[in-house]
Image: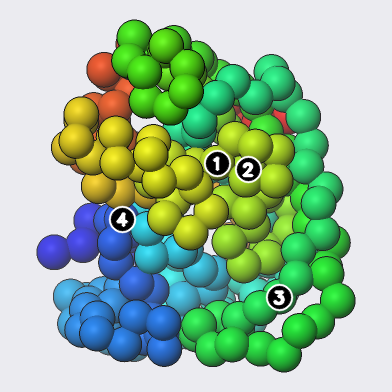
Amino acid sequence: MLTILHRDEQLIAIDKPAGLLVHRSDIDRHETRFAVQALRDQVGRRVQPVHRLDKGTSGVLLFALDGEASRGMAAQFERNEVAKTYLAVVRGWPPESGTITHPLSRTHDEYGNALAAAEPQSARTDFRRLAIVDWPCAVDRHPTSRYALVALAPHTGRRHQLRRHLKHIAHPVVGDATHGKGVHNRFFRHEFGCHRLLLACIALRFRHPRTGDPLTIRAPLGDRFAEICRRFGWGHVAVPDTPT
C-alpha cells in the first residue's frame, strides 16, 4: 500500500519508497511493480505522473488525475516554476552552500532507452550543507570518514542531475552505485544495514493547476534514511524550505 501525501479532485501525491520504479523501463526489465500501476490499482482510476524520481530516490511523487491537471503541471515544470527540495547524504564535506552549473549530456530518454550522443544541456543545482560528521572508522585511505547532510534544489530536470552534479564536485551521494564510490556504499550496507540511495525528495512547491493557490507537499524521510540521520546526530537538524 502506497502512502498518499495529498489528494484532491485533480492531483494525488505519494511518498514513493526507494527501489520503486515510476513506470516500466528497459533498464530494469526484470521489475514487475511500478508506481503508476500500483497507485492506479490502489485508488481505482487512471493516474498520470507529472514528473519523475529515480528508482533509488524516495519522496514526493506527484500525479495528475485528469488532462487539465496534467497539462497545467507540465507547463509549470517546463517553466521551472515548481520548487523541489531534496536531502542527500554525501561523502566528504562540501562547502556550506553553492551552485553547480555543470552541463549534462542526455544519454537516455525517460523510459531508460539509450539515445544518440547529444550536446550537453545546461543544468543548475543549488545546495546547502546542513550537518557534518567525522565518523571514527577508516573506510577509505583516511583514519576517519567524513559525511554530510545536504539540501538540494534542482532548477533544471536533467536525467540523474543531482547524482551527477554531486559527483562532479567530488561529493557523491552515498548508496549511488552508478556515480558514487563503492567502498563507502559497502560500508553503509555492512555497518548500518543501509542498502538504499540516500537521496530523497522531501518537498514540492507549486501552484494548483485549477485554483492557482500555492501548494506545498512534504514527505518524511522514513526508513533507513532517517535512521542514518539519527546515528550521525542529525535527527534535529532544521531543513530549510529552499537550500539557497
Image check: 52 left or right of 153? left
Position of residue 30 measured from the top left corner of the image (x, y, whole percent): 24, 85
Q: Residue at x 67, y 63 (%)?
A: 157
Q: For this view, does 22 lie left or right of residue 240?
A: left
Q: Describe the element under mark 4 as helix, strand or loop.
A: loop
Q: CA distance from mark 4 to mark 3?
A: 23 Å
Vertical arrangement, residue 228 with respect to residue 236, above or below: below
Q: CA distance from mark 1 to mark 3?
A: 19 Å
Q: Amino acid at mark 1?
A: Pro
Residue depicted at x 79% and y 37%: 99
Q: Are discs 2 and 1 less than 8 Å apart at CB? A: yes
**Looking at the picture, which amino acid does disc 4 mark?**
Ala
Q: Considering the numbered disc 3 on the image, is that residue within a helix, a strand or a loop?
A: loop
Q: Which numbered dot is residue 172?
A: 1
- Residue 72 x %, y %: 65, 75
- Point out the tag, 4 or 3, that comes first from the N-terminus: 4
List the residue tagged with mark 4: 18
Residue 106's label in the rendered image is 3
